[in-house]
Image: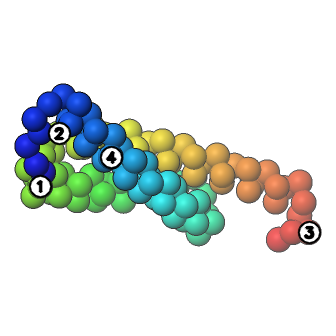
Amino acid sequence: MKSCGSIEEVRANIDRLDREIVALLCERHLYVNQAASFKKDAEAVKAPQRVEQLINKVRTTAAEHGGDPDVIEQIYRGIVSTFIEHELRLHRERTREQTCNPENE
């Protein structure tokens, strides 16, 4: 991280980082879509133990990079919660399609 000489420079760097973050979140979204196809039921989607493992990892990573683990945890819980809701929606749609079209199994 470099020191900025103006608010405009700070904002330009934040904008640059936001573009990178959004690109990475979109990539993560593609993997979440793939993961949904491997999960058999809603409990597998929710995977509370996996969520806690992930949270522990991001807290450690935040601390390693000089960030506030509590802030990063809060952000990540929002991200994970949103992706879980998305996966649950995909799972419900897939289940509905299989119920309506049993010959597709």
Camera sees residue 46 = no
Q: Nearer the viewer, mark 1 or mark 2?
A: 1
User: Alpha-carbon distance for marks 1 and 2?
Assistant: 13 Å
Distance in Å between CA atoms under marks 3 and 4: 49 Å
Q: Position of residue 99 (x, y in %)?
A: 84, 55
Q: Name the amino acid, label 3.
A: Glu
Report helix, strand or loop for mark 2. helix
Asked whether disc 3 touches disc 2, contact meaning CB atoms under 8 Å apart, the reply is no
- The numbered mark, 1 or 2, whose residue comes first in the sequence reads 1
Image position of 97 (left or right of 74): right
Write the residue at 82% across / 71% down: 105
- Marks 3, 1: nearer the viewer: 1
| Residue of label 3 | 103
Q: The residue under label 1 is which amino acid type? A: His
Q: Which residue is mark 2?
A: 70
Residue named by callout 1: 65
Tell me residue 21's x, y (percent). 37, 50
Q: Residue at x 57, y 51 (%)?
A: 87
Q: Earlier in the sequence, mark 3 or mark 1?
A: 1
How far apart are the alpha carbons under marks 4 and 1?
19 Å
SS for dot 3: helix
Q: Residue at x 50, y 48 (%)?
A: 84
Compared with 13, 40 (above or below) is below
Q: Nearer the viewer, mark 4 or mark 1?
A: 4
Q: What is the crowding at mark 4: few (fewer than 14 residues within 10 Å), some, or many (at least 20)?
A: few
Q: Which residue is mark 4?
A: 16
- For marks 3 and 1, give the CA distance: 52 Å
Amino acid, disc 2: Asp
Kind of residue indicated by mark 4: Arg
